[in-house]
Amino acid sequence: MIKLPDALSTRFEILVNTIPDSLARLHEALLPELCVTCLAPDARKGLCNGCRGDLPVNDRCCARCGLPLLLARPGRERTCGDCIKLEPAYHRAFIPWRYEFPVDRMISRYKYQGQRHYGRPLLSEMALLVDELLTRQPDRRPQLLVAAPMHRKRQRKRGFNQAAEIAEAISRQTDIPWSDRLLQRPRSARPQSGLNRKQRLSNLKGLFELHGGVPRHVALVDDVVTTGATVGTLATLLQQHGAERIEVWALARTPARVNRSEQALHDVAGDRQAGGQPG
């Protein structure tokens, strides 16, 4: 295998990541759109109706941080134990999906493999869902969308910042201005994946900087919230510089690990609701 010099390799990766947008537009103009998950020819914005219905909706979650709560009823607001014990710096979260199949595969391919056609359906759907949310609750409309920052070396290698692309998609749908410069990450750190919350918080110390004035009401935009350490750190920084109300908007939230007793209670509750008897 031929190995390109580092500088040329980086430029090649950036070029490869910019090509799919043009190809996607050409494909949509000339050929039927295929579903990115099952390849059905009747897709709309990247997903067929069946696969769109299979997306794991995060409708039982903490209203504060978006953590999935298996025992909560859909549509009823709940606050998780962690947010009750220690309130995060942000005030509300809007995270429409759980980080489970097929959303996890779609985000992974989009984010880590540069296959941006896997991300487009989620970005498009997210923008529409935010628009619907703001129609129902206009008081949640922020003055600015702030993309979670990425270190310049990582962004140069990947070719894009997924948080910035999500913010831009929402901005196009809602006319809310967005920025990927207000928050910056001047130094790199070890990847957050594989770290627990305590390790993540330690890894994030002094990692971010703020450049510019902060509006009173902002929405912090990211792709996936895992432990909440990153968005919590960023929200604290925004709060320290004048933000009075902070929303967190992300595509997906990683569910907490469920112990066996809690899962058993969940199974019993499901059996009773279905009219059956627990086994």
Image (cartoon, rainbow, N blue to C red):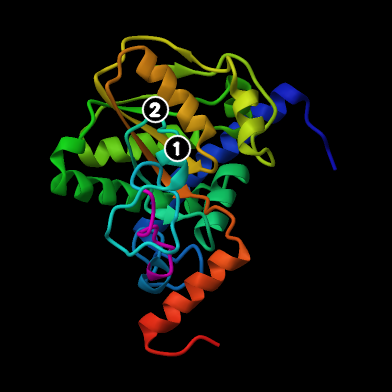
Say if 117 sits above or below 10 in the image.
below
Q: State the mark number for residue 89.
A: 2
Q: Where is residue 90 in the image (x, y as percent from the top left)?
A: 36, 31
Is residue 39 visible to us here? no
Front in this rendered view, residue 171 or 14: 171
Say if 53 sits above or below 113 in the image.
below
Say if 117 sits above or below 141 in the image.
below
What residue appears at the point 41 percent right and 60 percent down from the top-left corner? Answer: 46
**Label 1: few (<14), some or many (≥20) within 10 Å?**
few
Q: Where is residue 216 in the image (x, y as percent from the top left)?
A: 24, 19
Is residue 208 visible to us here? yes
- Residue type at mark 2 is Ala
Q: Position of residue 110 (x, y in %)?
A: 54, 47
What residue appears at the point 60 percent right and 34 percent down from the top-left corner? Answer: 158
Locate the N terminus by quadrant. top right
Q: State the mark number for residue 85.
A: 1
What residue appears at the point 56 percent right and 43 percent down from the top-left corner? Answer: 111
Q: In which quarter of the image is residue 242?
A: top left
Mark toward the viewer: 1 or 2: 1
Local SS, label 1? helix
Q: State the mark number for residue 94.
A: none
**Label 2: few (<14), some or many (≥20) within 10 Å?**
many
Q: What stretch is highlighted in magenta?
A: 53-62
